[in-house]
Image (tube, rainbow, N blue to C red):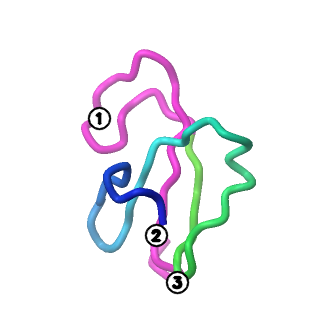
Amino acid sequence: MQDMEKLHHLGGGEFCFKWDGKGDVRGYRPPAGFEATADLTDRHPVTGEQLAVSEWWMFLKPEGGEQ
């Protein structure tokens, strides 16, 4: 999994992290046991604060979790 200091815990076993810009988000492979989705957002997913520019964020949730 990503460096723990870069992960934001969202509760319920879900995490998110800011995409580092290296490569295409579609090429990301999540760790075993997790599903991943990417979102281009203009708000910080944890604080809800407006970002200066839109950023890609990756969201990880346990496989088979609720939709």
Q: Residue at x 52, y 84 (%)?
A: 64
Q: Would you say the residues marked 1 and 3 are in contact, meaning their CB atoms lie under 8 Å apart?
A: no
Q: Residue at x 34, y 23 (%)?
A: 50
Q: Residue at x 55, y 39 (%)?
A: 20
Q: Secondary structure at mark 3?
A: loop
Looking at the rendered structure, the kind of residue marked 1 is: Gly
Which labelled disc corresponds to residue 67?
Answer: none
Residue 22, position in %: x, y? 66, 39
Q: Residue at x 34, y 73 (%)?
A: 13
**Residues at marks 2 and 1, CA–CA distance in whole angstroms:** 20 Å
Residue occupied by mark 1: 48
Residue occupied by mark 2: 61
Q: Secondary structure at mark 2?
A: strand
Which labelled disc corresponds to residue 64?
Answer: 3
Is residue 65 or residue 34 the one in the foreground? 34
Residue 49, position in %: x, y? 28, 28
**Residues at marks 2 and 3, CA–CA distance in whole angstroms:** 9 Å
Q: Which residues are magenta?
A: 40-67
